[in-house]
Amino acid sequence: MIEVEDLHKAFDGEEVLKGIDFTFEKSKTNIIIGQSGSGKSVLLKCMLGLFTPEKGIIKYDGKPYSNFTEDERKDLSKQIGMVFQGGALFDSMTVEENVMFPLKMFTKKQNKENEERVKEVLKRVNLGGNEKKMPSEISGGMQKRVSIARAIVNRPKYLFCDEPNSGLDPKTATVIDNLIQEITHEYDITTIIITHDMNSVLEIGENIAFLKNGVLAWKGDKSQIFKTDDETVTDFVYSSDLFQKVREAQQQGL
Amino acid sequence: MTKTSVLKSLILKEIDDLIIGSMGIVSFLSFFIGAVVALQTALNLNNPLIPKSLVAYAARQSIVLEFAPTFISIIMAGKVGSYITSSIGSMNVTEQIDALEVMGINSLNYLIFPKIIAMLFYPFVIAISMFLGILGAYTAAVMGGFVPPDIFVQGLQEDFIPFHLVYAFIKTFLFAFILATVPAYHGYYMKGGALEVGEASTTSFVWTSVVIIITNYAVTQLLLS
C-alpha cells in the first residue's frame, strides 16, 4: 500500500501538484487519470523518488519515504517494477537478457536458476519461445509484455505502469490491461497505472484517482466513474464520441 | 552500484565495440596516410644535397608525433564519439536511462565508466596506427623506387628521441579520456527526440575535436617546448 498525504510539487515556482491525498491499495489496480499536464507523471515520479516533493508525505506500507535511509531506499528500488510508456527495453539485449537484467543486478542466484525464472515469467506473459529475439524483432504489444515480464521478474511489491497501452490497438491494449490486473491479484502487489484511456479505466479501474490541474478532483472505482454527476469528471470521461453515444443510449434506456 | 560481474561483461563489450571495432578503419587510414606522407616528402625533395633518408625521418616524425595520435583521434571522435553519443542519447530518448534509475542502478556509472575503462586500451590502437603508418611510408617510398630499403631504415633510426614516444602516448591517454567523456556527456544530458540525438552527435563531434586540438596544443607546449 502506498499513501500520499498533502503532496505538493512545484517547478520554477509553478505548482504542479497542489496537495494530493490518496491511498493506492494493495492487490488492486490503482489508476491515475487526468488530462495532459494535470500532474499524473509528476505524482508518479514523486512516488518513485525521481522528484523530491516540496511538501507532503509518501508512505510505503506505512513508513514515510523521507525517513528511509540510503540502504532502505536501495532495497525499496529492488521491490519496485516499472513498465514504461515505450517499454524502455534495452535494445542491445535479447528478450531473455532484458528480463534477466534485474535478477543479474540484484540477486546472487546461479545463471541456471535465473534462466528458469525468466522462462517462467515469459510464459506468464505469453511470450514463451521468444527468448532469443531482439526487441526490434517483436511487435509493440510484445515489447510491452516483455517490459511487464522484466518488471515482475524480481517479484516486486509495487508495480508502476506509465500508459502501458499507449500506441497499441484496442485488442492488444485490452490484453495488456487484463494481464496487469491478473498479475496484480496473482502476486498480491500494489499496482499504479497512469492512463488517458477510458477503456482501461472501464476494464481494470479498481481504485481511481482523477487529477485536474494538480488537484485530486475525484476518486472512486470503475462502477462509480460512469455514474458520477461531477462535471469535472464527466467532461473528461465523455470527451470521446463513443462514450458520449453510450451515455446517450443509457439515458434513453437503450 | 553496478555488480562486478555485470561491469566486467560491460567493459568487455565496450572494448569490442570501441577498440576492436575501430581497428579496420584505423589500419586502413594509417597505412595510406603514412604512404602519402612518404610520397609527398619524396616528391618534394629535389635538392641532391638533401639525403634520401630524410623521407623516412620525416615520415617517422610526422606519424609518431601527430598523424597517429592526433589525426586518428579526430577520426575516432567521428566514429567512436558519434557512437557513444547516439547510443546513450537513444537510451535517454527511449527512457532506458530512467529504467536504470528506477531499478536503483547508477546510470552514469553503468553507462560511462565501462567506456572510460575500455578506452584505456586506446594507446594500443595508436601503437598499431604508428606501425602501419611507417609500414605504409616504407611501402610507398621503397616500392615506388624513391628510397633504397637500407637508406629508409637508416632514416627511421636517425636522431630518434625516445621521449617523443612518451609524449605521443601521454597525449593518447588524454585523448582517450576525452573521446569517452565528451560524447558521453552530450548523449547523457541531451533532451528531445530522435532529431535531437542526431544534433547531439554532431555537436559532440565538434566539441570532442575542439577539445582534442586544444589539449594537443597545451600538451605539446608543456612537454616539447
Image: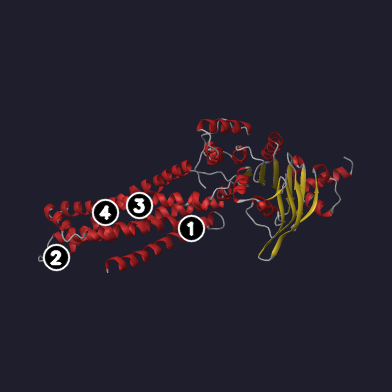
Same subunit: marks 2 and 4: yes
Q: Quadrant of residue B164?
A: bottom left
Q: Earlier in the sequence, mark 2 or mark 1?
A: 2
Q: Earlier in the sequence, mark 1 or mark 3?
A: 3
Q: Residues within 10 Å of mark 1 (few under 14, many from 20)?
A: some
What kind of residue is marked 4? Met
In the picture, measured across the screen, residue B59 lies left or right of residue A14, that is: left
Q: Residues within 10 Å of mark 3 (few under 14, many from 20)?
A: many
Above or below — where is B2 with respect to B172? above
Q: Which residue is mark 1?
A: B185
Q: Which residue is mark 4?
A: B130
Nearest to viewer (mark 3 / mark 4): 3
**Residue visible at 28% across and 53% down?**
B30
* Disc marking residue B167: none
Same subunit: marks 1 and 3: yes
Nearest to viewer (mark 2 / mark 3): 3
**Which element is circle 3 on?**
helix
Q: Earlier in the sequence, mark 2 or mark 4?
A: 2
* Disc marking residue B46: 2
Q: Which residue is mark 3?
A: B122
Q: Nearer the viewer, residue B90 or A250?
A: B90
Identify the image quadrant of the C terminus of chain A: top right
Measure the C-alpha gap from mark 2 to mark 1: 50 Å
Measure the C-alpha gap from mark 3 to mark 4: 13 Å
**Residue visible at 17% across and 56% down?**
B156
In the picture, measured across the screen, residue B60 lies left or right of residue B9, that is: left
Same subunit: marks 4 and 1: yes
Tag 2–tag 4 contact (CB < 8 Å): no
